[in-house]
Amino acid sequence: MSDLLTKRSRDLKYFPGIAHLNTAHTWRGGEQQVLYLASLIQKHGGRQIVIGQPNSELEKKCAENSIPFRAVKIRGEWDILSAGRIVKIIKENKISLLHTHTARAHAVGLMVKKRCPEICLVVSRRVDFPVSGNFFSRRKYLTPLVDRYLAISENVRQVLIEGHVPASRIRIAYSGIDLSRFSKMPDPSYLRKEFRIRPGDIVAGNVAALTDHKDQKTLLDAFSLVRKKKPANEKIRLFILGEGELRESLLAQTRLLGLENAVVFTGFRTDVLSFLSLFDIFVMSSKEEGLGTSVLDAMASGLPVVATCGGGIPEMIDHGQGGLLCNVGDAAGLGDGIDKLADSAQLRKKYAKYNLQKVKKFSCESTFHSTIEAYAELLDKK
């Protein structure tokens, strides 16, 4: 283990300064991971600063949690002016390690590293899209300026290796969740009233942006097959939580399949935990998924899962133990899984119990420790 970690394994006040760079304006899973990490670094006495977009959701969350934040307007991947401002912040705050958390931050971080070669540059990779073969992408990923890549799953690690990033420069730090949020689940009675859910109804749920790679199109096809399979399945309802560019086309598909009374598109909701309390089955139909913290949330809520093998999902869900998996795009397989779990309360309970134990591997504390080990490994070499 690193000398830094051996000497002060839980006290980061002996670490040099750390800066996090995130370029998102909105709030999604990646931003939540930044907040979890920064909060735990602060808890353990680390000196850090978060750099991000002015008036972003991350800026608001950092303010709420008393985490130091500096706003820098970043207009694009190769925004030289913003890179110059970040260099100034790094020098003023005596930062030794810059951790970038988005694709745009990765590019800006390279410009910063060129002007501050003494710092360590760490890049988080959260998606499992293949590394593009074009000149700019290869230059961005294969440059020796990046000291370490942190992949959020083994699947993402393999994608980087297939993109010719040396395995020696990649470490895994699984995305994690705050398990304490699930210690007391909210009462979903008001949702049963709001959506007129009858006693005996089985509720399946999906929480994801309405985008192509989340593939709710296949989910709707699967649910149509479930409803047609036998009369008892008329008691199954499907809730889809999220917003995105495919909303209208998915609504049109729902009407075409005659599912208007069985499928509910809730849009963006702040009461996701209440919906997780409401669900009997969690369903994920993704084509690609770096890891998928909504699946982890479902596991921590004590839910069985039906999902595709998209991306890192099989690293979370053990087939036949915590849920049922099928191939990407397999509507029939997804439907069979939903039908099987809807038919058996005993199986749902068995899978839920398994997931409550498995999800402990994916706590935000585990992510924190993996990340700090990667930091210390680099800083010890300086």
Image (cartoon, rainbow, N blue to C red):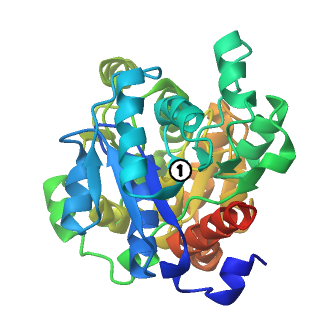
Q: Quadrant of residue 326?
A: top right
Rendered location of residue 248, percent (x, y): 30, 19
* Residue 237 seen in the figure: no
Q: Residue at x 71, y 27 (%)?
A: 130
Return the residue nearer the eye: 176 or 231. Answer: 176
* Residue 297 seen in the figure: yes
Rendered location of residue 93, percent (x, y): 38, 57
Q: Residues within 10 Å of mark 1 (few under 14, many from 20)?
A: many
Quarter of the picture containing the N terminus is: bottom right
Return the residue nearer the eye: 302 or 331. Answer: 302
Q: Please, is residue 220 above or below residue 245 in the view?
A: below
Q: Residue at x 21, y 39 (%)?
A: 54
Return the residue nearer the eye: 46 or 363. Answer: 46
Return the residue nearer the eye: 314 or 189. Answer: 314
The residue that disc 1 covers is 99
Quarter of the picture containing the C terminus is: bottom right
Q: Is residue 237 left or right of residue 293?
A: left
Amino acid at pointer 1: His
Count of numbered badges drawn on the protein: 1
Q: Residue at x 43, y 56 (%)?
A: 34
Rendered location of residue 180, percent (x, y): 40, 80
Residue found farthest to the top? 134
Q: Residue at x 24, y 51 (%)?
A: 59
Rendered location of residue 256, percent (x, y): 38, 17
Regarding mark 1 in the picture, which secondary structure is present there?
Answer: strand
Q: Please, is residue 329 above or below residue 226 in the view?
A: above
